[in-house]
């Protein structure tokens, strides 16, 4: 780009060329500094997101474990309710049979 500028304008002195190069290097340094800051922020955010992901993953595993435990408890309780219902039916049948026997006497 510098050679393009030199061809289109009058010849530049060494000082002018150095000044243009110095400005160009300052711009590059400023851009590199900005990019470095952006990359630092991206890296920091990535670490935050990974930490959050690990925390959420752990919470999910704990939640799933608790859910499986509750499902097991529910199955046990449902079976117990069925067993109690059967016992109640048997007792009612016994009571009905006892009532019939007492009426027959």
Image: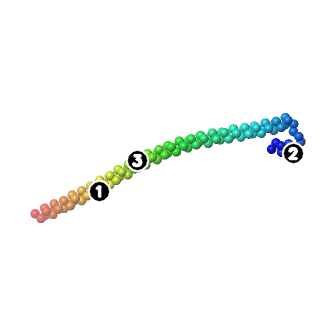
Q: Are marks 3 and 2 in contact (CB under 8 Å)?
A: no
Q: How far apart are marks 1 and 3 (CA)?
A: 24 Å
Left or right, 47 with reference to 11: left
The secondary structure type at the circle numbered 2 is: helix
The secondary structure type at the circle numbered 1 is: helix
Q: Is residue 95 or residue 48 the one in the foreground?
A: 48
Residue occupying the far left of the picture: 105
Q: Are marks 1 and 2 in contact (CB under 8 Å)?
A: no
Q: Name the residue under label 1.
A: 82
Q: Name the residue under label 3.
A: 66
Mark 2 packing: few (<14 Cα in 10 Å), some, or many (20+)? few
Is 93 situated above or below 21?
Answer: below
Q: Where residue 89 sits: x, y (%)?
A: 24, 59
The C terminus sits in image quarter: bottom left
Query: Which is more N-terminal, label 2 or label 3?
Result: 2
Left or right, 63 with reference to 11: left
Q: Where residue 68 sits: x, y (%)?
A: 39, 50
The N terminus sits in image quarter: top right
Q: How far apart are marks 3 and 2 (CA)?
A: 76 Å
Left or right, 84 with reference to 1: left
Q: Is residue 41 or residue 25 the one in the foreground?
A: 25
Query: Which is more N-terminal, label 3 or label 1?
Result: 3
Mark 1 packing: few (<14 Cα in 10 Å), some, or many (20+)? few
């Amino acid at each position: 780009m510098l050679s393009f500028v030199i061809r289109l304008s009058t010849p530049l002195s060494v000082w002018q060329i150095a000044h243009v190069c110095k400005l160009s290097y300052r711009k590059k340094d400023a851009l590199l500094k900005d990019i470095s800051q952006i990359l630092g922020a991206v890296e920091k955010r990535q670490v935050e997101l990974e930490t959050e992901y690990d925390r959420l993953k752990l919470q999910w595993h704990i939640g799933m474990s608790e859910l499986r435990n509750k499902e097991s408890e529910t199955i046990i309780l449902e079976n117990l309710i069925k067993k109690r219902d059967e016992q109640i039916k048997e007792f009612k049948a016994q009571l009905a049979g006892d009532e019939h026997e007492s009426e027959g006497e």
